[in-house]
Image: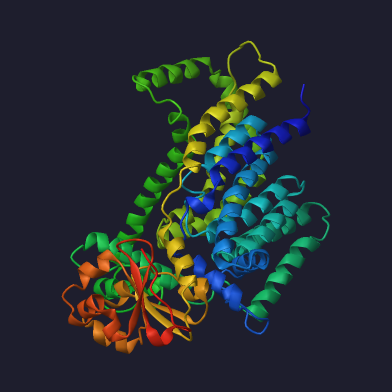
Amino acid sequence: MPTGRVKDFAGILFVLLSSLVLTYKITHRIDVVATDDDVYFHNGLIATWQQLPPIQMAPLFSAWYLFIHQFTGDVINTYYVSCLLLSIIPGLLFYSLLRSLTVSVLISAALAICFLFSQLNLPLQPKVSVFTMLFLMVGLIIANYQKGPVTKLTTAAGSALLAAYGRPEFFLSFLLLCLIALGYYVWQRRRTAQKVPYALLGIMSMAALLVIFLGSPLAGGRSIIAFGQHFALNYSVWHPEIPASPWMHSSLFIKHGFGREVTSMTDAFFLNPGLFMQHIGANVVNLIKITATNLFDILINPWLSMFVFPGRRYVLIALALLLVGLVSWPQTWRSVRLRVAQHGWYWLCVAVMLVSSYISCVLIYPREHYILFQMILYLSVAGILLHSVVFRPLPALPELVRYGAFGGVLLFFLLPHWRVANQPKPTPTADLLHFLQKIPVNGGISMTGNDPLMYNLYLGDNWQFWYLERYYPKNMKQFFEQFKINCIHIRPDMLETYKNDPFFTNLIANPAMLNFVRYNTGKADQYVLVRNQSLSLASTPHPY
């Protein structure tokens, strides 16, 4: 019979094997995506001891990128290594978290693997939320192995403090956890003698020093910027007649709804209470819908995808009825109550930690990278419930048989994912970046196009980019002169949008007359034009 350590070793192997299949040939299947992560990465690259990244702008995530970059030396490679690690580590931590709740090895492995292949893991952007979640999970795992309530709360508070330097809203969770821990200590001290909570006082002192010297994570205007962008997202649904992008022109939607720019969410409420509450109501409805979709994607869809055949619905209904009949519901209910009560302090820690996440979802918008944090609670509940199920007396299978059967089912589950992993997919943005790296430019490059990347991050600080959808230029000649454009990425959508602009059509028809050199990207419908004076040496266009 396998020992506890052997069982856990097997469980970790199951999760690691799944992670290998998930991330195999990641650079051939996953493209570079423009997100807020680019800003954090760039902040890390330009940081000095005299100029640290802003405390509200995920400085620990900047440090994460910078650490990886020391080994890769290439920004694109750093992007992919970070993506790979942040797609593997969550599965291992979910497994460890469930095991710390005494959930069985096979159930813990199954739930961790289901999360690995969900839309909240590898496809999720930005990755700063995944990075932040790791701190919360590590803190909860360590807390579960502590004995005293104050120690558990202190450990959770420490992880929330670290998380605040990934996503600043978790500073509120840190404050609440410290307050509860301190209050519980004072209450207990009135009844019995208690040791001074030096760890709690130390963490609180450290946080105070960080706030004094670096500022509070909750300060700054980041929350109102996020509110404006996501209010605009809701408002654009209610008013589709407004011809603008809510991401690029959120102030237009804010002024349309509230009459002027807003300085805070309180300001927005008093300017137009009805509209503000409509925004809150829409967020609550969307939170329920998106959470349900993601839970189905994690807990149900992986198993349904394994059964694809005619009459599947009736077979699954029959299996469900069979399972319902085999469960001993009175024993299961008693087991659930016992296990939930056994981990009461864990549920308190999780609930207080996630207060910040739920507030963000309700006041701002239930983005998937906000909802991600809540999966810690939901998967914990799922693990406890599944582990608590008691079946009616059945012949018991030897553990080696059960582990072998789990491995067989896992291989059956991973086979289609392995096939997908071996099928290359288009990576147009990464291809473009590799292409632009090879152009021999000299001096500053002022580029335009429809790919909203931070080109200065991937190509160097001498590159600037002006996103056409943000400026909507009515006169391309004036636009080129205003921003001193000397590089342009030509794509079919751009040709269609500006086909009636005389300067642009002339540039496309004969770039050499305007002193531009054409570089063919290898795609028949895309190429790059660079002003001749911006090139470091005489160069010829690349062939198709």
State the residue at coordinates (21%, 80%).
506
Which quadrant would the N terminus be assigned to in this image?
Answer: top right
In the drawing, does residue 190 fall left or right of residue 274? Answer: right
Return the residue nearer the eye: 37 or 485: 485
State the residue at coordinates (66%, 15%).
397
| Place of residue 504 in the rendered image (x, y in percent of width and height, measured from the top left) | 23, 78
| Place of residue 513 in the rendered image (x, y in percent of width and height, measured from the top left) | 27, 85
Please name the colour scheme applied to the rendered image.
rainbow
Which quadrant would the C terminus be assigned to in this image?
Answer: bottom left
| Place of residue 407 in the rendered image (x, y in percent of width and height, measured from the top left) | 62, 27
Return the residue nearer the eye: 527 or 97: 527
Q: Is residue 74 above or below residue 97?
A: below
Q: Is residue 402 above or below residue 181?
A: above
In the drawing, does residue 147 fall left or right of residue 216? Answer: right
Number of residue marks: 0
Q: Is residue 410 above or below residue 398?
A: below
Q: Quadrant of residue 109?
A: top right
| Place of residue 417 in the rendered image (x, y in percent of width and height, measured from the top left) | 49, 37
